[in-house]
Image (cartoon, helix red, strand yellow):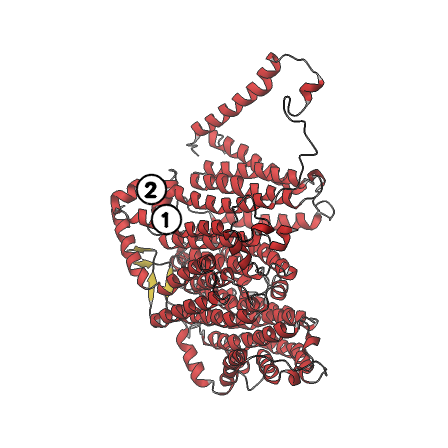
């Protein structure tokens, strides 16, 4: 006992220094909840500014953590530490990603009708809590931490979806989200308990070691892994756990939708890729057989993930075709996008079985592009929606004349989501397709191509509506702050499509 | 299988857990469903204790039976305008075949995995001894980060739940 | 399979048996059986009952139950700490104490929140009382 206490003290002392961004976020949650109580008589936007200051401070701490490679908290065994969190480049990228999304959502929320002229300390506290959960998801090296991170992010998302109590659609979305989410969470923890029973550990490194000697068959392990995958897929909004997506995206306040579609998805992917890597042996070979029949994977993760990817994009794109509500359309679009992103994960899994090793660069690049194009699209929808009450595709008629810059930004983002040059989405998708072909996933690449063609229908439907349909409605004033946010979000979509090689080089540095 | 005291206890508790669980699905009155759930949860708590997971059993009684079930009953009583015994559930209106087939399939797959794997015994903290003390020790040493984070989780969930349950002023005055 | 809680089981069965024996069996044997209309009423010597017992519950019960549930989970997490406290303090001094103190302080913030927001106020303020401090905060947060 003396030993374990001493070790724990040491581990905590070492861990605390590497945990500053997370501690700041936790403090921000507390401060925002209390600020609403004790800061009376100040302007409604004060809490939003507290949130901004908190996020920026967290960002500064995160920047300082760049380049770290440390497994923190947990315990120590003779052959090394068994951490709860692993701060590395991969975690850093996704944490920065989530934080940036949260930061963009603050001005969007300040502009949104549901939050304007109110003190919404609770909302920003939930945003900070969700961000904290996603931080944990991105750096978790222990299934317990991954699960805790998912619960953090989920609980905060459920509440944020239904935050506007006057809005019935939001309440309905929140309720559906929480019910489906509880099921997904239950399924996942069932899978975790199975895997724990098979391997005797929840630490990814221990799981990887145990899998090499344990006698669980491929089928048994597969069932545990698929159950766990269901929990991650719920956060990614990917098939087969995508069905909550349209109702929640439509019902939630648009800033919340934007945050969920970008940050929540990224954190889900980050946590899943980390879990996936636990199925990799020490020497780097990817395997799924056990004991005597241990062989590099032929059937296994690439097929399962590839199948989920193919179904995600097909379900998403076909579902989007008939949508008339813009947020619902983008919800289906984001399911399809999850499919493309899963394709990158399938490529990574396939690469793990080959001497070259897995390559995460296409995933990272696509996520960078996805950040700007999806947030850009949602930003325009928030701004237009809060000024005209526009919700359906038809409401966007004549936007090219009524708000030319907003329409231009949205159009560019849509083209990028579709994967047209000269946008970031095009380069991202090209990298995905070529990587898939290189790793013998030709069928997946072909399906992705067909899906891109299908998706052109609904992206162009919205584009046509904005530029070709006539409308007598007046000009929409968007405000300078919103224009600035638009520029910040849309310019990189073009930059990523034109000057892509430096960013592609950079994206190679954020793998494992 | 030799019949000893533990085996008899197991089957007794299993019946307490499973039979009410069936009644939860079959009963048509939602208040009765809640009370059948109470019985089922008691049986599961007993099973946990029988298996040496005393802390889990305690938590089951404390949180599920003492907390969540009360919340469910409050929820039922709060939302109903009519006398409660008329609150029928929707079960029985649909064909039970789909549900039965799905349930049987899920059960078969999970049972096959659980029986087939042959979990190694006592991999966890328990060696048949009471687990609460050992859990306390690891919770405050190896798992201190999740332990502290749970308090933040509970904090914002508490505030969020209170926020959601709070009526708007218009409603309060109606 | 050993069952180390046999004494608990015995106590449980003994208690249940005691209740059943007294309420159902002994009562039936010993109680005088005189039936008149007054004795069959709900409260033999109290107010006459009005209406049905199946009434719609007030929202306040639910709010309090929610708050109770969260703190109950907290208490459940304190059991292992209490059980291990002796060994932990002997080995590591105040380490375990400080950890749990932090845990409690963070959750205490939640208590401050529900208190200040007036979620625990049983008698809610009416229109005339909106200047009341806690309700004033409540209104500000709920769009006013």
Q: Secondary structure at mark 1?
A: helix
State the image coordinates of residue C89 (x, y, percent, origin top left): 27, 44
State the image coordinates of residue A418 (x, y, percent, origin top left): 60, 79
Quadrant including the N terminus of chain A? top left
State the image coordinates of residue A345 (x, y, percent, origin top left): 50, 70
Vertical placement of residue B44 versus A250, above or below? above
- Residue A291 appears in the figure: no
Q: Are marks 2 and 1 in contact (CB under 8 Å)?
A: yes
- Residue B103 appears in the figure: yes
For the residues marked 2 and 1, what is the alpha-carbon distance in whole angstroms? 10 Å
Residue under pointer 2: C84
- Residue A29 appears in which quarter of the rendering? bottom left
State the image coordinates of residue A122 (x, y, percent, origin top left): 50, 59
Residue under pointer 1: B139
Quadrant including the C terminus of chain A? bottom left
Residue drawn at point x = 39 percent, y = 46 percent = B124
């Amino acid at each position: 006992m003396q030993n374990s206490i001493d070790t724990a003290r040491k581990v905590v002392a070492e861990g605390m220094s590497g945990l500053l961004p997370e501690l700041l976020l936790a403090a921000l949650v507390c401060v925002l909840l209390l600020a609403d109580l004790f800061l009376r008589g100040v302007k409604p936007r004060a809490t939003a500014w507290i949130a901004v200051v908190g996020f920026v401070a967290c960002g500064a701490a995160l920047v300082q953590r760049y380049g770290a490679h440390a497994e923190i908290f947990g315990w120590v065994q003779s052959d090394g530490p068994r951490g709860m969190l692993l701060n590395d480049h991969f975690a850093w990228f996704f944490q920065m990603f989530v934080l940036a999304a949260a930061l963009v959502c603050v001005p969007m929320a300040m502009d949104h009708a549901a939050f304007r002229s109110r003190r919404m300390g609770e909302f920003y506290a939930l945003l900070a809590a969700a961000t904290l959960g996603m931080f944990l998801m991105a750096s978790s090296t222990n299934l317990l931490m991954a699960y805790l991170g998912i619960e953090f992010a989920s609980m905060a998302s459920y509440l944020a979806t239904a935050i506007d109590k006057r809005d019935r659609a939001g309440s309905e979305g929140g309720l559906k989200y929480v019910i489906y989410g509880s099921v997904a969470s239950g399924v996942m923890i069932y899978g975790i308990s199975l895997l724990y029973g098979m391997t005797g550990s929840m630490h990814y490194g221990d799981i990887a070691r145990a899998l090499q000697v344990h006698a669980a068959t491929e089928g048994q392990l597969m069932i545990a892994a698929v159950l766990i995958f269901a929990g991650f897929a719920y956060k990614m909004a990917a098939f087969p756990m995508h069905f909550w997506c349209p109702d929640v995206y439509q019902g939630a306040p648009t800033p919340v939708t934007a945050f969920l579609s970008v940050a929540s998805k990224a954190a889900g992917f980050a946590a899943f890729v980390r879990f996936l890597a636990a199925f990799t042996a020490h020497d780097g070979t990817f395997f799924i057989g056990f004991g005597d029949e241990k062989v590099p994977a032929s059937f296994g993760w690439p097929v399962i993930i590839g199948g989920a990817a193919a179904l995600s994009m097909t379900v998403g794109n076909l579902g989007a075709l008939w949508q008339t509500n813009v947020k619902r359309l983008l919800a289906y679009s984001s399911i399809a996008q999850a499919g493309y992103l899963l394709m990158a994960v399938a490529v990574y899994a396939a690469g793990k079985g080959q001497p070259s090793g897995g390559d995460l660069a296409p995933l990272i690049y696509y996520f960078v592009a996805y950040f700007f194009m999806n947030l850009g699209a949602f930003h325009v929808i928030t701004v237009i929606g809060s000024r005209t009450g526009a919700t359906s595709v038809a409401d966007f008629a004549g936007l090219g004349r009524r708000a030319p810059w907003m329409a231009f930004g949205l159009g560019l983002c849509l083209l990028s989501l579709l994967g047209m040059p000269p946008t970031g989405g095009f380069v991202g998708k090209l990298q995905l397709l070529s990587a898939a072909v290189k790793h013998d996933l030709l069928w997946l690449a072909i399906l992705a191509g067909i899906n891109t063609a299908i998706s052109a229908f609904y992206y162009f439907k919205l584009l046509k509506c904005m530029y070709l349909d006539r409308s007598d409605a007046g000009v929409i004033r968007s405000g300078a702050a919103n224009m600035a946010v638009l520029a910040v979000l849309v310019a990189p979509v073009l930059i990523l499509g034109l000057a892509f090689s430096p960013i592609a080089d950079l994206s190679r540095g954020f793998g494992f | 299988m030799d019949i000893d005291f533990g085996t008899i206890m197991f089957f007794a508790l299993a019946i307490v857990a499973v039979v009410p669980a069936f009644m939860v699905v079959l009963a048509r009155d939602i208040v009765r469903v809640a009370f059948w759930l109470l019985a089922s949860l008691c049986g599961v708590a007993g099973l946990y204790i029988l298996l040496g997971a005393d802390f889990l059993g305690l938590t089951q009684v404390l949180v599920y039976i003492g907390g969540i079930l009360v919340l469910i009953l409050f929820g039922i009583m709060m939302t109903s305008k009519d006398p409660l015994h008329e609150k029928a559930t929707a079960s029985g209106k649909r064909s039970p075949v789909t549900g039965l087939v799905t349930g049987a399939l899920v059960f078969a797959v999970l049972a096959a995995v659980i029986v087939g794997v042959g979990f190694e015994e006592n991999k966890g903290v328990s060696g048949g001894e009471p687990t609460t003390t050992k859990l306390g020790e690891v919770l405050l040493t190896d798992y201190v980060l999740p332990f502290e984070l749970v308090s933040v989780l509970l904090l914002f969930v508490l505030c969020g739940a209170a926020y959601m349950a709070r009526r708007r002023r218009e409603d309060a005055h109606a | 399979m050993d069952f180390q809680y046999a004494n608990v089981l015995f106590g449980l069965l003994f208690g249940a048996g005691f209740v059943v024996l007294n309420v159902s069996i002994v009562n039936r044997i010993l109680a005088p059986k005189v039936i008149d209309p007054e004795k069959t009423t709900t409260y033999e010597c109290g107010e006459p009952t009005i209406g049905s017992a199946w009434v719609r519950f007030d929202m306040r019960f639910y709010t309090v139950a929610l708050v109770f549930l969260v703190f109950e989970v907290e208490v459940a997490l304190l059991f292992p700490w209490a059980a291990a406290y002796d060994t932990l303090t002997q080995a590591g001094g105040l380490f375990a104490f400080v950890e749990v103190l932090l845990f409690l302080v963070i959750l205490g913030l939640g208590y401050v929140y529900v208190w200040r927001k007036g979620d625990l106020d049983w008698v809610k303020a009416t229109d005339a009382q909106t200047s009341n401090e806690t309700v004033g905060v409540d209104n500000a947060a709920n769009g006013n």
